[in-house]
Image: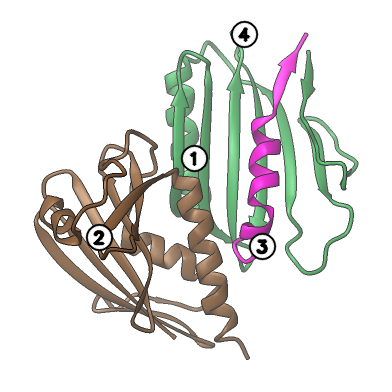
């Protein structure tokens, strides 16, 4: 099964190892943290219902990244959910936008875009569009 | 720099001040404090407490009196006015279950409601916060 994503032309891919199937950043950027898009491709152990997966992911996110829930959209029929959070990461205030896609075999693909809140007005459009372009094929 | 947030919800009006300088962010009257000015978007979002879900807008685009929005802020309707140095910079109305509008003035002294997605609001807030935090850095 292949994972496809529409990466902006002026972003570069970095080397990755499974379960990370993509890591990308702007080819040129000044300052830190650098906006980053990643894609993780995993199998959910056991026969997990989509609703249970969403609930578990939200609990996990609130524990690992305590912050502000900006946006949540769950599409149970399409087995997809979007979540955006704002939190602190390594001393920086960042916004993280994610799309989770779960297929019928318990495989999940998660695209995540992260950027500093200070940079968010400049990169939001590109990051949101890229994360939402994630899809599985084959 | 000082942000004032006036909030109407459930028939009650609350007022907060978010004071930002190079030492961090203080929230009054609750006494919250944050060490980094760059967190101002998240701090303001926490005070606003708007819904993370999208949905039908609570008001249509018909020009109306400001007072009618205040009067409507009972039950599941909320209204907030964010002011920076005394001037309104962001006015929002929402339904608790999802659905948000930005309230903008019209030329004839009325206001009009324009639908906004939670991510649009967050991006606007980060832009506002960037201006505020950059104005306070040393």
Rendering quarter of residue B88: bottom left
Q: Can see residue B36? A: no
Where A57 falls versus B133 (above or below)? Answer: above
Front disc: 3 or 1: 3
Give how far across and how far down residue A116 sits, in percent: 64, 61
Tell me which segment is drawn in magenta: A116-138
Disc 4 from disc 1: Cα separation = 22 Å
What element does badge 2 sit on? loop
Let me know if marks 4 and 2 both belong to one chain: no
- Callout 2: chain: B
- A114 or A57, which lies in front? A114
Q: Closer to the N terminus: mark 3 or mark 1? A: 1
Q: The green chain is which one?
A: A
The 10 Å Cα crowd at callout 1, few under 14, some 14 to 19, many 20 or more, is few
Q: Mark 3 points at which residue?
A: A119
Which percent across, then down, holds residue B97?
27, 37
Q: Is residue B51 visible?
A: yes
Residue at x 26%, y 65% (from the top left corner): B109
Front-most of A21 and B116?
B116
């Amino acid at each position: 099964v292949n994972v496809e994503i529409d990466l902006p032309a002026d972003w570069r891919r970095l080397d990755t190892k499974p379960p990370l199937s993509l890591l990308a950043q702007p080819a040129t950027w000044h300052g830190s943290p650098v906006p980053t898009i990643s894609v993780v491709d995993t199998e959910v152990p056991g026969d997990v219902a989509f609703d249970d997966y969403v609930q578990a992911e939200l609990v996990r996110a609130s524990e690992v990244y305590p912050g502000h829930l900006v946006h949540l959209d769950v599409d149970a029929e399409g087995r997809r959910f979007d979540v955006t959070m704002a939190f602190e990461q390594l001393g920086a205030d960042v916004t993280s936008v994610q799309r989770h896609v779960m297929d019928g075999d318990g495989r999940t693909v998660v695209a995540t875009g992260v950027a500093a809140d200070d940079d968010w007005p400049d990169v939001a459009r590109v990051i949101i569009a890229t994360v939402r372009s994630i899809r599985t094929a084959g | 720099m000082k942000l004032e947030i006036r909030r109407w919800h459930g028939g009650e009006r609350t007022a907060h001040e978010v004071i930002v300088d190079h030492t961090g962010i203080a929230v009054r009257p609750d006494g919250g404090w944050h060490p980094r000015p760059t967190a101002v978007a998240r701090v303001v979002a926490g005070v606003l407490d708007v819904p993370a879900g999208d949905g039908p807008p609570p008001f249509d685009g018909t020009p109306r009196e400001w007072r009618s929005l205040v009067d409507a802020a009972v039950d599941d309707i909320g209204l907030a006015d964010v002011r920076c140095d005394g001037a309104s910079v962001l006015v929002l109305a929402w339904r608790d279950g999802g659905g948000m509008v930005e309230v903008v003035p019209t030329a004839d002294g009325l206001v009009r409601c324009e639908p906004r997605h939670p991510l649009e609001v967050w991006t606007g807030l980060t832009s506002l916060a960037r201006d505020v935090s950059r104005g306070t850095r040393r």
